[in-house]
Amino acid sequence: MTFGIDLIGLVKGFGLILVYAMIFIESGLFFGFFFPGDSLLFTAGLLASQHVFSVWGLVIGSTIAAIIGVNVGYHFGKVFGPRIFNREESIFFHKKNIQRAEDFYKKYGAFTIILARFTPFVRTFAPIFAGIGHMNYRVFMIYNIIGALLWVFGVSFAGYFLGQIVPNIDKYILPIIALIIVLSIIPALVKIWSEYLKSRSN
């Protein structure tokens, strides 16, 4: 179970279509920030090592879904960006997540599109801010494709190869996913700590 979700059961039950859909939603739709993208890809890679489905079907389809999803996020931000800042807090919209992505984008520029792939919350909102900021579309797509390839292939094959090397790895899936979640939020924690230290020194 991850965030109350039985990822293994869901992926086994619905197959790669579910994986593609969740990756697309998390990558491109602002309410998809709570989807466990890293855990999902790792779990799917693990299941691919057990021949539940093809690992190449997983990585190729998920990469395409991630690229298209981020592209949708970019155009959403470009067209509807100004309205985002006028919305009230809701179950799907939290201004602190938007601010986090905006700060990340300002700090790293176009490279954010790659870095954001490995950072929860930011992964969803960074392409929206790229659209709001009218980032050059050609540059955006280059970083979008590179980021999708690194993220999907890296996380999926980590699960795939670990599943081949470690016997009965499904017994350890929960602590492994917990570790992935911890590692993925470390950059955000480091930033929060650095901002805290800056505020203390001022």
Image (tube, grey):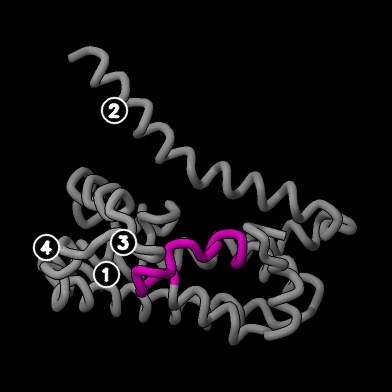
- Report helix, strand or loop for mark 4: loop
- Report helix, strand or loop for mark 1: helix
The residue where tag 1 is placed is: 142
The residue where tag 4 is placed is: 133
The residue where tag 3 is placed is: 125
Q: Earlier in the sequence, mark 3 or mark 4?
A: 3
Q: Position of residue 27 (x, y in %)?
A: 40, 70
In the depicted structure, whether residue 199 falls above or below residue 147: above
Q: Disc 3, disc 4: CB below 8 Å?
A: no
Q: Earlier in the sequence, mark 1 or mark 4?
A: 4
Q: Position of residue 138 (x, y in %)?
A: 17, 74
Label 4 or label 2, whichever lies nearer to me, is 2
Q: Position of residue 96 (x, y in %)?
A: 30, 49
Disc 2: CA contacts within 10 A as few (<14), some (14-19) or many (>=20)? few
Q: Disc 2, disc 1: CB below 8 Å?
A: no
Identify the amino acid type marked 3.
Phe
129 is within the stretch colored magenta? no
**151 on left or right of 108:** right
Disc 4: CA contacts within 10 A as few (<14), some (14-19) or many (>=20)? some
Q: Disc 3, disc 2: CB below 8 Å?
A: no
In the depicted structure, whether residue 4 falls above or below residue 108: below
Q: Nearer the viewer, residue 95 or 186?
A: 95
35 is within the stretch colored magenta? yes
Label 1 or label 3, whichever lies nearer to me, is 3
Q: CA distance from mark 3 to mark 2?
A: 20 Å
- Start-end of magenta stretch: 26-41
The residue where tag 2 is placed is: 195
